[in-house]
Amino acid sequence: MRFLFKTAYEQDIKLFRDRTTVVWYLVLAVTVLALPAMLSRYYIGEITWVFIYGICGVSLMVLVGYTGLVSLGHAAFLGIGAYAHAYLVHHGVPWVASVAIAVAITTACGVIVGLPALRMTGIYLAIATLAFSVIIQEVFTRWEGVTGGFAGMAVDKPEIFGIRFSNETSFYYLCGATLALTLLLTQNLLRSPTGRAWIAIRDSEIAAQSMGVYLPFYKSVAFAYSAALMGLAGALFAHKIAYLAPDIFSILFSIQLLLLVIVGGLGSLQGAVFGAIFVALLPPIIAILRDSIPAGMADAAHATGIGLIGTIGHGIGEFLKKPGVEAGIFGLILVLVILVEPSGMYGRWTKIKLFFSMFPMYKRDSFKRQKSYMRSERLR
Amino acid sequence: MTFFQAENLAINFGGIRAVDDVSFTVERGEVFTIIGPNGAGKTTIFNLVSRIYDPSAGRLTFEDHDITTTPPHRIAEIGIARTFQNIELFEHATLLQNLLLARHVNRKSGFFSELLFLPSVRRMEVEHREAVEKVVDFLDLQQYRDTFVVNLPYGVRKIAELARALCTGPKLLLLDEPSSGLNVEETDDMAFWIEDIKNLLGISVLMVEHDMKLVAAVSDRVLALNYGRPLATGTPQEVQNHPEVIRAYLGG
Amino acid sequence: MLQLMFLRRNGVVALEFVPRTRSDTGIDWVGVKPPARGGDKLATFLQLTLNGLAVGCIYGLVALGFVLIYKATELVNFAQGDFLMLGAFVSYMAIVWWGLDYWISFLIAALAVAAFGALLDMTVLRRVIGQPQFAVVMLTIGLGAIFRTFASVTWGSEIYTLPTPFSGVTQVAGVTLSHQYLSIIVATLILCGVLYGFFRYTRMGVAMQATSQNQLAAYCMGIPVKLIFSLVWAISAAVATAAGILLAPVTLIDINMGLAVALKAFAAAVVGGFGSIPGALIGGITIGLIELYAGATLPEGIKNTAPYIVLLVMLAVRPQGLFGTPGRKRV
């Protein structure tokens, strides 16, 4: 069991708590850098999705996990960033400038959508963001001059300063670097007064006001920063998906993003990355299981002579092949996470780490949840 | 120069006149207590002074500035800090983060310098931390620094409320029932701390309290309220022996 | 799948077959609308009003379900639209698969989905009491996804038609009165009347009102609060089922029929005021009428988003809705 002995205020301010943490993150970084040499193109492509969803996750985590403002329509910002960037790149604007302008446009939209947040709370804000998202999706469909409407819009791979990022590996590194930069910048904000102000808004607006936090400013900044990150993710998303269409950025996508932050673990950046891994990698895993479970269980049935195993395997395979099952599995996992482990994947990871660090003196009820009674959020 | 003055404060909630024509002054360096039965409007007055509510009538003056229309987030800048009756700490943050947030009024870094975490921001973070540590020393909260507030026991949370209010560096401190929920020893500690706040830190205190022993021990002057209306103002002994006050508390 | 519709393109009216498109923001109403003849604005207006009332009643019923659950338990049930979908499917199964009578199937579906709603409250929702509202909202969203997948696996993912005894039309003074639309309006009125009587005059109903106003006091009065919550869920689910069965002949049954309705019903509940039962119905009718009037007069894009624009305006101008009461936290 290690004990961290603090001797300087710097230790609480710096990014990594101690040497060991730095070493582990270095190992992680080296692994991520070396993956293209070890895995096939298909898997590298899937991990690139993890990076892009990771940036989306950080964006939503800042707004929902740290500031407590629930947004049910964040996919709209992804769409604004994606369409803006694609449009500018098609019209010859250099890549970096195009991304910068797309981020600026998305930030401006974020500030506008955030204006209702200054006056309303909780479920009303969520419904307002939902309404905005529907309206923005309709704009994508109707503004055919810019977005191509229902017909969609094709997007090439990026070309930055003359270098084409046309293969999977180079795009993987680009997305990975962007995610790393996003995490660094966001962590900087979270350990400074702005991040603390956000947490204050989440936990008690009235106390925050009494401490001098000007609510409208910090709520707007939260929306603006979150939208800016979504715009950045949108630019990369446009390249990755290669063909933009309005029905991609639907309410169901927004809900998938919320699922990302909840399953990952609200209230931590690591949760955003865990959630991204979950959301990006679950569909390919289901696709693999669809074939491997029946085949594997059929082999087991042959080996053991119990035909039932093969039948069950066949049944599971058929079930997974039906349309719409993926959404149901996501829903089931969301329900289970909220019921069983509300602190998400990162919460569970923290508990596991504590168990091993305190072994064999781990106390069984270290994380026993106190019975909580309904605290009325209805304003009296 | 008047330090703090409330003149003819009044507020209506629908048809109920919660506070009716209340006037009092707080001198620099004194402890002024407001007492009264439950529902008398004491916390409402606090909410009026920290500008969470808008008064229907009356005026608030602090250091010769009219603060009747100041927005609530500027009250901490002016030098008025408050604690809350039902503890409004930031539950899912550590005690240290709660206290550092209280330093928000002294924030000098802009958004973009924080985004890049420039050396100037780093220096300012260390300064904030040093200022907060002085309050932690004053109230003996060292062992709770890194605990999440949701895990702290009730008595410690009350002290944390006080600590957070002190971290804003106020000139006038509003304490809303500081001893509610505390046992005898903790109340004695609280009395000593209020005295130290007055004498060592030079902060004036405006307090709402039910515990008469505490009121008599620390207060310089007392205001008694009932149904939103003032009954008596004076030293603790004068007010406690005032016939109207006795009738309000004991009836008949 | 094609539908027959009068379409107005660039001022010219034509009768055309158009493909059914299911967007997740709009309901497509199958029906024959009269062309907008120049001198018959009144008939068109009345027709639109009738259609709008019918649409609005559906939204109002679903919004009613939202508001009932919100008033009692302070939860927003994002799966309300999926109760509607489940009710429609169960009635379809009863009528088409089992060959039962329409009214018996109605009853079976209402009871089955109501029982399911109560069961859901007892098993799942009771465990999340005390968690922040956002977590519970996400829980109901997840449950909705599970219901949709369940429906897809059990009944199939195509579009199905529900046979109904109200398939006729009557012509009155140039206005086409679809019997199905009339049945929606009449059924909503009956249902609201029954609910009003229930809440006002029966012991259980009064107990429900008490529980939604002050839970602790209700416990002290000996009211079985947990049972009441389950009953509230059951009633909400039954109301949604009724809406689904009434809606099914008009928009046809498929897995996503609940989503489109639920979104507009939200807007309806917010416009009416989230804590107000009559507000839910009036909000629903308002949104329904706005949708129809906007659809006839405004360009294509605005039609789908008009209800949401109204929602945003209402939130900006009067956040508590038409009938709600503003509130403030006491510190």
Image (cartoon, coloured by chain):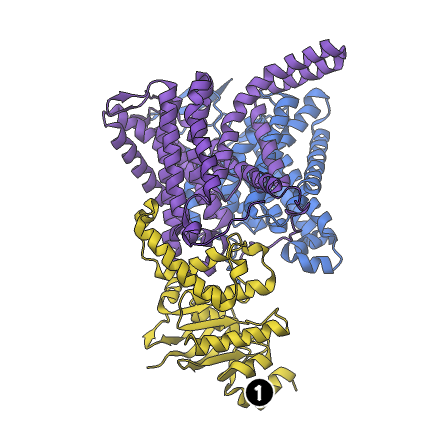
- Locate residue B82, reporting x and y percent: 46, 68
Q: Secondary structure at mark 1?
A: helix
Residue at image point 30% right, 37% down: A105
Q: Nearer the viewer, residue C276 or B104?
A: B104
Q: Which chain's residue wears label 1?
A: B
Residue C301 seen in the current view:
no
Q: Is residue C199 left or right of residue A82?
A: right
Q: Is residue B106 left or right of residue C325?
A: left
Q: How many marks?
A: 1
**For residue B155, what is the image quadrant?**
bottom right
Q: Colour of chain A?
A: purple
- Pointer 1 local density, CA inside 10 Å: few below 14, some 14–19, many at least 20: some
Chain letter for the part of the structure drawn in yellow: B
Q: Locate residue C254: give its quadrant.
A: top right
- Where is residue C61 drawn, in percent x and y? 59, 41
Q: Residue at x 38, y 45 (%)?
A: A188
In the rendering, what colour is chain C?
A: blue
Residue plotted at (53% across, 52% down): B92
Q: Nearer the viewer, residue A161 or A260?
A: A161
Instruction: Identify the amino acid type marked 1.
Output: Gln
Q: Judge from the rendering whether residue B176 lies leftward or rightward of residue C308; answer left or right.
A: right
